[in-house]
Amino acid sequence: MTTRDPAEIRTDLPALLRRLRLFLPAHCLLVGEEDLRPYECDGLTAYRELPLVVCLPETEAQVIDILRTCDDLGVPVVARGAGTGLSGGAMPHAQGVVLSLARFNKILRVDREARLAVVQPGVRNLAVSEAAAPFGLYYAPDPSSQIACTLGGNVAENSGGVHCLKYGLTVHNVLRIRVVSIEGEVFEIGSEALDAPGYDLLALMIGSEGMLGVVTEVTVKLVPKPELAQVVMASFADVAQAGDAVAAIIGAGIIPAGLEMMDKAATAAVEPFVQAGYDMNAEAILLCEADGTPEEVAEEIARVTAVLTAAGAGDIRVSQSEAERLKFWAGRKAAFPAVGRITPDYYCMDGTIPRKRLAEMLSAIAGMERKYGLRCANVFHAGDGNLHPLIMYDAAQPGNWERAEAFGAEILELSVALGGSITGEHGVGVEKINQMCVQYATPELEAFHRVKAAFDERGLLNPGKAVPSLHRCAEYGRMHVHRGELKFPELERF
């Protein structure tokens, strides 16, 4: 069989509904437009599409039957968690089914001795840590949306968070997953042991954006809650100094639990919203967290403070209580909604660059603000070079969205030119699919397509996402990449 172009798929809706109603009760099947409308997009609201049907299975057997039905009829399937994703990865297919895992919301087991939890994919990220707290344990990856995002979505996107620098992304904290293929076959990848024989299919599945299978169970690693955590907050009069300070901290051999950066535009939005105590006169602030035993924390705080002072930090404050530590972090984690209060719309980007080039990127973004006539607030997982520029625009104004989209594309392509990547944790989805043509050459894209075909030969799982067709890249190259010429000639080649 060969993969069809997603745009050419036509689904026989009456036949599909007849099959689905054989095993799904009425309350598990949504078909009316008003019921479908909440599923038309994820957190990236600029891209929308109504599905034909939304399925809300309650058992793994129903998931299997849904996938087998869609495979038999050639119907596209888009798996969905909480819909908090920011790359359009859960945007429906117009001729397809949305398979929502929202009702798979049980924590099946917390094992204190083995330091793991077995959960269904619809369990909220924060709920895992809440369940593990009585045992002195928690789940380390903490996306800003952790109060709402689910483990299934985290697995699909390989989500991170402010503590991923020390504790890793989702891929570093998942031990095993249970997956259903498009043909309805159930298989398990990974184990509760530290390693498993054979190819590392677990790492392949995590971050695959729902294109290889549907996850129905996740076993995650839990870590001991540290005895103490403190945050150093440092102010800088220049964003370049702040960027250099980040590189200096890592260069000194210090791996903080978290190392975050916000520029003046971001703190100006956040402080009135959260009142975290940020320096409103600083051009940039850094938040650097140390955790461990009291002795370990004291030593690390002293080392970090010395590095920050040498890097030119002005005001340096250390949290003096758990409440103050949480307040410092509350501002960073509220950056997105805070910006949403001051602009009709914003477009959140997600690129990654080498830490040493943060200052170059910030300078370039300032130039892009002038070029596109749009404001941008910048927040960073600075320790690992993952940047989240928040481009502010008004979708009601003609041409505003197009400028914002072009602004975002230029940031991503500059990220590649600086030696980085078009994504750090949000995934590719539909948002960055053109920039995949910049990130990768034809042989690499062909390899991605072969992997996809090995799991989903006809391309029914989340079609049109993450991996572009070679034809699409040829068209994008003609329009934007100028036949392989370097878009940023002032930069060295990598």
Image: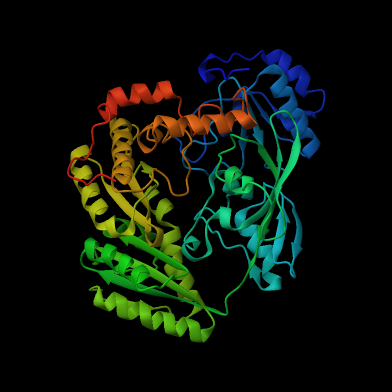
Residue 349's place in the image compared with 225, above or below, is: above
**Coordinates of residue 477 in the picture (x, y in percent):** 31, 26
Residue projecting furthest to the bottom = 295
Image position of 61 (left or right of 168):
right
Rendered residue at 67%/12% (across/down): 12
Q: Across the whole image, how many numbered discs are drawn on residues?
A: 0
**Coordinates of residue 305 in the picture (x, y in percent):** 34, 79
- Could you say which is closer to the camera, residue 304 or residue 467? 467
Looking at the rendering, in which quadrant would you find the N terminus?
Answer: top right
Examine the rendering and report whether any part of residue 398 can be seen.
no
Image position of 348 (left or right of 85):
left
Examine the rendering and report whether any part of residue 242 can be seen.
yes
**Coordinates of residue 251 in the picture (x, y in percent):** 34, 69
- Could you say which is closer to the camera, residue 251 or residue 161? 251
Image position of 251 (left or right of 155):
left
Residue 77's place in the image compared with 145, above or below, is: above
Rendered residue at 41%/73% (across/down): 254
Q: Quadrant of residue 479?
A: top left
Image position of 142 (left or right of 283):
right
